[in-house]
Amino acid sequence: MIAVGVLGASGRMGATVCEAVAADSTLELVAAVDTHNAGQVCADITVVDDREALVKASTEVVVDFTVANAARENLPWVAQQGMHAVVGTTGFSEADLVYLQEVYEAAGRVCVVAPNFAISAVLMMRFAEIAAPYFDTAEMVEFHHDAKIDAPSGTARLCVEKMAAASRQWAPDPTTNEILPGVRGGSGAADIRVHAVRMRGMVAHHEVILGAEGQTLTIRQDSMDRSSFMPGVLAAIKAAPSHSGLIVGLEGVLNL
Ligand code: NAP
């Protein structure tokens, strides 16, 4: 049994993770921490606001679904306490990832940072990477619920980085007159444009559109429900104890 603690346990994702861990016979939910809703019971564990509860409960793997500012502070501490981390929180910079690599390597622990734990999203990124060299234009649209505070999604950023690394043949943006500022979206890696939609009723959806002479290819994934992320989170928790350092992307533990 792997002892699992959750940071952000009363959040939308954290609460779903608590239920999924508690329902898995090879895992044990030992601590639930959140700065919000202390005292609330989640999967038979009372949520507390002090992260020391993770240490007191002998947690082996900490799952973090909070906000980037909190995770920046908590994740180095998790490694220093000798615990592994599985991180779904998005909004990290390149410098944050370099620092996490150093800290976790030094502690001999692993930090799995996956901007998207849904297998459909991991496969979308892989398919987009394969398709990239055959097209000269690409754009990415991501759609999320109306409470997401960072934009674009970590998945959109990572997907664009993978496409940019897979091909150097991108056509320049033809726009010379942007009448509505920002209408062409954000400029991702290789100037691939990223568009972020925030919409009540949605969960997490991504669409990659690639174009070449006379043809386009659209690759789309949809997470209809937060349960879509749970098989990936559970797989990362189970794989964590046999790794060290930083792993970015679920594909790093699934060997895709
Ligand atoms: P949410 O409902 O706002 O939950 C975040 C929770 O973390 C809140 O209860 C928040 O409390 C708590 N929190 C903030 N700082 C904390 C700290 N220092 N210690 C403990 N708890 C703390 O957000 P969500 O929808 O669950 O999303 C959480 C994160 O996961 C976001 O970054 C989102 O982008 C990401 N996400 C990732 C995936 C993936 O597959 N990787 C999928 C969905 C979402 P307060 O309300 O007091 O701030």
Image (tube, grey):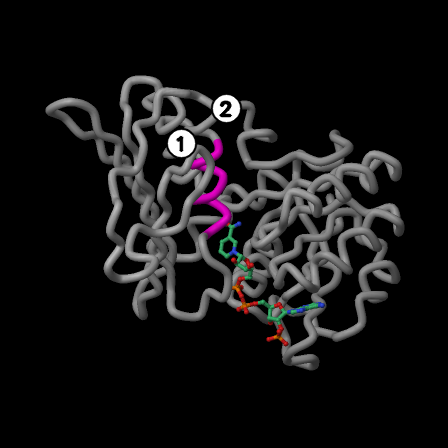
Dot 2 corresponds to which residue? 256
Relative to 33, does residue 193 appear above or below in the rendering? above
Could you tell me residue 2's position as x and y percent? 73, 45
Q: Is residue 215 left or right of residue 130?
A: left
- Circle 2 residues within 10 Å: few <14, some 14–19, many ≥20: few
In the rendered image, the quadrant that contains the N terminus is top right
Label 1 SS: helix
Using the image as rendered, state which of residue 28 and residue 132 is in the foreground.
132
Residue depicted at x 32% and y 22% = 131
Q: Secondary structure at mark 2?
A: loop
Q: Quadrant of ligand 1?
A: bottom right
**Is residue 184 within the magenta segment?**
no
Residue 170 vertical placement versus 219 (above, below): above
Amino acid type, label 1: Leu
Amino acid type at circle 2 is Leu
Q: Nearer the viewer, residue 47 or 159?
A: 159
Magenta region: 153-161
* Left or right: 60, with 81 as reference point: left
Question: Residue drawn 53% across and 30% down?
Answer: 251
Provide the residue designation for mark 1.
Answer: 123
